[in-house]
Every structure is written in structure tokens, then in C-alpha cells.
Image (spheres, rainbow, N blue to C red):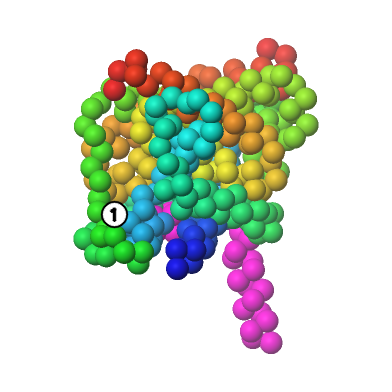
Amino acid sequence: MGAKREVKDLQEIMTQLWPWYVSGPLLGLIVPLLLWLGNKDFGISANLRHICAMWPGKKPAFFQYDWRGQTWNLVFMLGLVAGGWVATFLYPGDSVHLNPTVLERLHAWGLGSPQSIVPPELFATSVLASWKAWAYLLGGGFLIGFGARYGGGCTSGHAISGLAMLQLPSLVAVVFFFVGGLISAWWIVPRVVVWLIGGGA
Amino acid sequence: MKYVFYLFYFLAGMLTSITLVQSQAASWYRIQEMFQFGAFHMYGIIGSAIVVAMIGVQLVKGRRSLEGPEIKINDKARTWTRYVVGGTLFGLGWGLAGACPGPALALIGGGWPAYLVLFAGMILGTWVYGLLREVLPH
């Protein structure tokens, strides 16, 4: 009886929102874990370069190296995709409870209250029928990919691993991640969301 | 033996993305909330991750890794233009798309194919950077 109850409790805990003081340390542990396993640096966007390096034809010098040496990271990346799938069995336990002021802004842009992890108005497969969604996704992705390689890393490489290794360049990068993010969130996103879902304006 | 480690790296990736989803750090909503300073949640995640990673790095630094090589911390090049300009461009994309590369991959696995288009955009951006690298100031 007791054991059964514990399993049920565990299930409940797993499916609810993991608080920051659980999820943050778990993500932080990945950095020493990868170092301890094989002296590997936690950096997800490096895989974008490795994928480009796989191109068999003519390619810029930046992509002319043996990507096979970075197979571990590509395997890690596949793990990310697989983990996202596993999480779908855990996720529906808790929806995204936003700050009411933030929620009001989203409503003003024409978005509904969160029912899933990301807004279906922007990311449901059906939105791909509109060229606007393609422009939004490809444009956003382009900035992420271009900026990450230009800046030498993304959130994992600079904000988590770089800062943990006390790298001043990472601190500069992270400060400017936030500069860009704030410009997007306050000035671009409101307009783009209204434009995307046709809120009239 | 090498293949056992691939399994470990795969599992480490799974742990990372399950955590990203269950903490809702992969959520577009949470990224907007973070940049609107609406909640401590995301700052708590990133801040505590840095602290734990920092302690962990100090513990493993200089030791031998399980695969063999000594654990070394590589210093990043100290030229600044790339971090300012590249960082800002990345941030613009991060805020706009409401996801960085890790969460995007988690959401692809989570059954949101639109994130494949976002990911394709990331590859395209990486490719164009490779093309322009020689002419960009770093």
C-alpha cells in the first residue's frame, strides 16, 4: 500500500512544474558531468556548425573539418530530441501559470491563455499554411544561428558553461543576449505577434 | 568502450531536455515573461545552474575524465566585437522565437514540427555566418 502511494506521489511530482531550485541545479550539473565523462564542453549551438560541416559539396572554410570528431555532441543533440518526446508523457500535469500583467499583454496581442507549453497561435502545425509563419520561424532561427556562431555560443555555451568557467567574454555575450532579448520582447514581439495572427492592427 | 560513452551523452541530452520542458524553460511564454521581468522563475533557473556548474567545474578541473583526457578549461578568445554584435543578434532571435537551440530541439521531439522550421533557420544562419566570416569584424 505504502509503496503504491509513493509511486503515485512521485508521478505527481514529476508531472508538475519543476521549481527553479530543482531544474536549475540539474541543468548546471550537465556542465561538470560532460567534463567528467570526456572533457566535453556543454554547447548546443556548436552542433549547427557540425551539421553544416556534414555537407559533402563545396563549403566555406569554416565548415571544412572532420565533424566525426564531434559525434558525441550530435548524439547529445539527439538525446535532447528524445528527451523532449519522453517529456510529453510527463508534461500535461501543469500548465504555464504566467504573471497576470504579462498575461494581460499577451491577451492584448490576441493570444489566448496558455493551454500548452507554447502558443498554438504561433507554433501549431496548421500555422505553417501561412507564409508569415515561415518568415517568423526562419527569420528568428536565422538570427539565433547567425548570432550564436558570430558570438561564439548560445545560452548553454556562454550563459551556463561560460559563466561557470568565469569567462569574461561569456559575460559580455550574455549581457548582449539580454540587450537583444529585451529589444525583441518589448519592441518586436508585440508587433510580430499581431502581424502573425492577424489581430487587425 | 567508446560506444558506451555515446549512450551516456545521449542520456545527458535526455536529462537536459526533460528538465527544460518540465521547468517550462522551453516555453515561449516563459521567455516572454522573463524578458518582461514578470517572474523570478527563469532567473532562478539560469542563476542556480551557473552556481552549481561553477562548483562542479572546480571539483572536476585538472582530474582525468572517464574517457581518458585530462579535464581542461579552455579560455575564450578576448576579442570583443563578436560578443557584442553576435550576442545582440542571438538575443534578438532568442526573444523573438522564444526559444534557444536546446529548447527548440526538445520541442521538436515534443511534437511541435514548426520548431523544425525554426531549426532550419538556425542552420541557414550558421551557414551564412560561415560564408561571411572572413569579412566580419571579430
Determine if the magenta segment contains residue A28: yes
Seen from the viewer's position, the closer of residues B11 and B66 is: B66
Q: Residue sitting at 52 percent across and 58 percent down?
A: B10
Q: Quadrant of the C terminus of chain B?
A: top left
Placement of A98 over or under B132, stated as above or below: below
Q: Locate the N terminus of chain B and report the quarter of the image it occupies.
A: bottom left
Across and down, in percent, residue A86 comes to 64, 58
Q: Main secondary structure of the magenta part?
A: helix
With A51 as the anchor, is A65 left or right in this view? Answer: left
Q: Residue at x 75, y 35 (%)?
A: A125
The residue marked by circle 1 belongs to what chain?
A: B
Identity of the residue furthest to the bottom in this view: A1
Residue A129 position within the rendered picture, expressed as x and y whole percent measured from the top left: 77, 25
| A18 in magenta | yes
Type of amino acid under label 1: Met
Range shown magenta = A1-29
Residue A54 picture location, percent across and down: 52, 37
Q: Quadrant of residue B136?
A: top left
Between A43 and A89, which is closer to the camera in this rendering? A43
SS category of the residue bearing label 1:
helix
Q: Residue at x 30, y 44 (%)?
A: A163
Residue A191, quarter of picture: top right
Determine whether B26 is above or below B84 in the image. below
Residue bearing mark 1: B54
Residue B7 visible here: yes
